């Protein structure tokens, strides 16, 4: 049995990969704990995972602007909290969210064995690290060195949205090894009984969330298909005008919705997008935050021919036309189905747990 500590933060899209991987390790008999923001306590404890809140960051609220993200990645308080957690609960491997650069830096200085968990596309994180290197180097933090020392860099994604994927090497926990685990979902091939559009935008209240929701809802009004909208916790039903005839849920698991979907309309978030594609469902993406990974993911969707992308400020008529084109495009559906087959072949949760077990064994 090995001991693992997952160090994470309340970023929305990183929650599911952390929960899924931690639960697989727990179910295999390992001792697993999670350290994160107090706002995450209910989700992790509800998943049956022992959870400790950062003592230095009570009441954390995400600020997705560059200055807010810079405060997060350079927060030495989170690093101190991690050191305190490890003093109380020594771990064979610490699994750290890729955004927590200060935590990675201190673990590297301690010679503590750690893995980096990337919850989006690896090329986006790698390019972001190069930018951060120039910004935080004067603070004495070694941004790139800890990532090279990570054993391994675990990517909760696939190599891209084009298939066939490049050949994957055997699993490795060597320092600096980049391992694509795949989607953190147990997906199946979607088989909708009737044409179905699922609309699921961000769980975070980005600046244009409400207006984008309204344009999308206006776009699907009167469509001769089944429309299901999951509003999420960041939006109250009274903030938007809901068309008659659509199904509205505050929240519903994507694993229950996407097997019955023909098209998913989203914001380009990695989790929603990869889950939809894992089910073989094309995606129409309207990125909400230009400084995030959403625009890059949306461009990858369009480039691979498994959906479409447009500005969050696109008018309802244009959004409607894009949805209708995607619904009627057999070639797009066929490409999405082939991609779904390739994603499902990864067995993401099991593959991630396998490589973390290799990491623990290598450190002994």
Image (cartoon, rainbow, N blue to C red):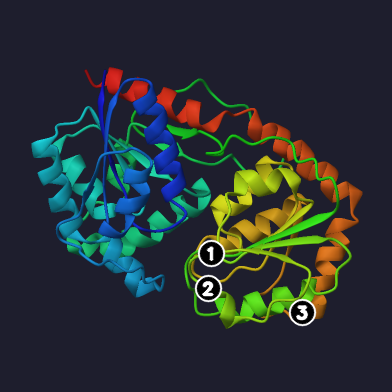
**Label drawn at residue 307:** none
**At which x and y percent is residue 79?**
18, 52
Secondary element under disc 2, as helix, strand or loop, is loop
The residue at which mark 3 appears reads as: 316
Residue 352 visible in the shown view? yes
Residue 235 image label: 2
What secondary structure is found at the residue carrying circle 1? loop
- Badges 2 and 3: C-beta atoms under 8 Å apart? no
Q: Nearer the viewer, residue 194 or 10?
A: 194
Residue 238, given in percent of the width and then of the height, sits at 57, 80
| Residue at disc 3, secondary structure | helix
Instruction: Examine the image and state in which quarter residue 96 appears.
Output: top left
* Cβ atoms at labels 1 and 3 below 8 Å apart: no
Q: Is residue 263 left or right of residue 295?
A: right
Res 161 seen here: no
Residue 224 percent location from the top left of the image: 89, 65
Report the Cα–Cα distance between label 2 and label 3.
Answer: 19 Å
**Circle 1 Cα neighbour tier, 10 Å, few/some/many (<14 / 14–19 / ≥20):** some
Q: Which residue is mark 1?
A: 232
Q: Nearer the viewer, residue 121 or 53?
A: 53
Task: Locate the C terminus by quadrant.
Answer: top left
354 or 37: nearer the viewer: 37
Query: Upstream in the sequence, badge 1 or badge 3?
Result: 1
In the rendered image, residue 53, in percent from the top left (x then y), is placed at: 21, 53
Q: Is residue 194 left or right of residue 184?
A: right
Is the residue under label 1 in contact with that under label 2 (CB below 8 Å)?
A: yes
Left or right: 47, with 162 as reference point: left
Residue at screen point 28% across, 53% down = 101
Q: Nearer the viewer, mark 1 or mark 3?
A: 1
User: Which residue is located at x 55 percent, y 53 percent?
Assistant: 270
Q: So how many labels did they put on this image?
A: 3
Identify the residue at horizontal 75%, vertical 81% (top origin).
Answer: 315
């Amino acid at each position: 049995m090995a001991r693992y500590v997952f160090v994470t933060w309340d970023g929305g899209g990183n929650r599911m990969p952390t929960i899924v991987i931690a639960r697989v390790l727990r179910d295999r008999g390992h001792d697993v704990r999670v350290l994160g923001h107090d706002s995450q306590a209910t989700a992790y404890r509800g998943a049956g995972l022992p959870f400790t809140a950062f003592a230095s960051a009570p009441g954390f609220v995400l600020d997705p602007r560059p200055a807010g993200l810079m405060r997060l990645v350079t927060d030495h308080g989170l690093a101190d909290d991690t050191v305190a957690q490890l003093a109380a609960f020594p771990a064979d491997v610490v699994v750290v969210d890729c955004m927590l650069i200060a935590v990675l830096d201190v673990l590297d200085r301690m010679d503590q064995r750690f893995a980096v968990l990337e919850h989006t596309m690896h090329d986006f994180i790698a390019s972001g690290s190069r930018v951060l290197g120039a910004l935080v180097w004067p603070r004495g933090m070694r941004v790139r060195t800890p990532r090279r020392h990570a054993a391994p860099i675990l990517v909760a994604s696939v190599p891209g949205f084009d298939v066939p994927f490049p050949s994957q090497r055997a699993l490795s926990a060597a320092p600096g090894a980049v391992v694509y685990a795949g989607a953190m979902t147990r997906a199946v091939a979607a088989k909708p009984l009737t044409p179905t559009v699922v609309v699921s935008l961000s769980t975070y209240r980005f600046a244009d969330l409400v207006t984008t929701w309204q344009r999308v809802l206006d776009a699907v009004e009167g469509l001769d298909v089944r429309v299901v909208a999951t509003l999420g916790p960041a939006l109250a039903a009274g903030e938007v005008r809901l068309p008659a005839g659509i199904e509205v849920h505050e929240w519903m698991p994507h694993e229950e919705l996407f097997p019955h979907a023909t098209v998913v309309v989203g914001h380009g978030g990695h989790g929603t997008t990869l889950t939809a594609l894992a089910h073989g469902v094309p995606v129409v993406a309207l990125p909400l935050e230009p400084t995030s990974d959403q625009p890059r993911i949306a461009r990858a969707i369009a480039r691979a021919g498994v959906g479409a992308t447009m500005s969050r400020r696109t008018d309802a008529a244009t959004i409607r036309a894009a949805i209708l084109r995607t619904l009627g495009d057999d070639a797009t559906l066929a490409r999405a189905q082939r991609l779904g087959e390739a994603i499902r072949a990864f067995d993401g949760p099991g593959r991630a747990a396998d490589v973390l077990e290799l990491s623990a064994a290598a450190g002994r």
